[in-house]
Image (cartoon, rainbow, N blue to C red):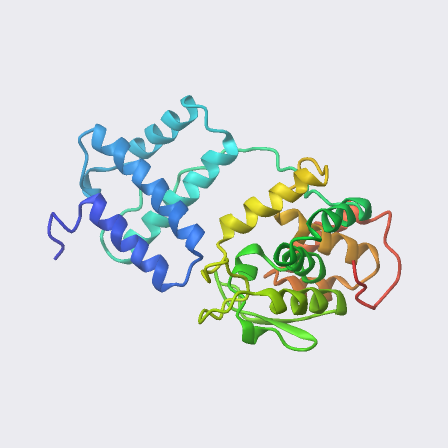
Amino acid sequence: MNSERNLQLIHLNEQFVQNLTSMRRARATIVAYSKDIEQLIKFLQDLNKKSVSEVDKLDLEAFLKKLSSDGYTPKSLSRKINSVKTFYRFLKNQNFITLNPAAEIIHPKYDIKPPRILSKMEYRALRDACRGDTRTYAIVELFLQTGIRIGELATIKLGDVKEKELVVRAQEGHPERIVPLNKAAKAALDKWLTLRPKSENDTMFITKTGKPLLVRNIRTTIDRYFKSAGIEEAKVNDLRHTFIAHHLASGTPLTVISKLVGHKRLSTTEKYLELVKEKIVTNVKLEEL
């Protein structure tokens, strides 16, 4: 039987984080979920509710209403709801609760912007902007030539890079996969390896002190080069979008692209067809960008 201390929200959040870690969820995801639940706990504590048994659906709805009044966008609220729902599913699965008050919480509707696809001129300008930064240039080439996710790129090990392929490790529920490594990507990686600091750490992309380059470091660096290249309203993930869209437009089969980028469902890849349908040509070869 669970003691009252074990049912306190603060302790349950600690166990929630441990569970996410054991499931090998991405560090950024774990931090985001944990911070969201901490925010919920603070709100509930202000209502003098510290135990999970004291919380009901009305409390969760009041929390979301407070966030909305504080200026959170529908998209941000939806992300918070994801965190809350995941937390309460964990509590239910671990038998800390019998009824899940978050189960019927509804996500707000909001417009989803279509992916930002860089033109050839734009991604070539990005290359030019970071050409003097060997590490960043290699990172940009990997994004453009493989469509890899930022979290996957940050965890590449030296041994994952083969002569003509890259092993993308399993994470976040995505199984391990192998993607082709073309000449442009391999050349950029080889050049980086000649300058890479000596380190016992086998992570491919590291800092000058030998520490792994974090996702937020990669994001900040690429954002800086976007600005330097004069590319507006672009984010790191748009390099992945660009890989998908350009290869679909060049005629690479949908199933091939879906497998290369690790989409769980073909329908996810199909959404990009609307963005490139007027440009599609017949081709079965994976071209360099």
Residue 53 in sight from this viewpoint: yes
| 41 or 150: nearer the viewer | 150
* Quarter containing the C terminus: bottom right
Residue 168 in the image: state x and y as whole percent: 57, 68
Residue at the (48%, 54%) spot, across then down: 214
Relative to 81, is 282 on the left or the right? right
Residue 59 in the image: state x and y as whole percent: 29, 32
* Quarter containing the N terminus: bottom left
| 88 or 39: nearer the viewer | 39
Relative to 118, is 140 on the left or the right? left
In this rendering, is residue 69 above or below 95? above
Image quadrant of residue 148? bottom right
Q: How many marks?
A: 0
In this rendering, is residue 7 above or below 160? above
Q: Residue lying furthest right in this view?
A: 281
Residue 255 in the image: state x and y as whole percent: 72, 65
Residue at the (75%, 65%) spot, across then down: 184
Residue 25 in the image: state x and y as whole percent: 42, 59
In this rendering, is residue 122 above or below 193? above
Residue at the (62%, 37%) spot, across then down: 112
Image quadrant of residue 247? bottom right
Residue at the (25%, 33%) spot, across then down: 44
Relative to 133, is 274 on the left or the right? right
Residue 259 in sight from this viewpoint: no
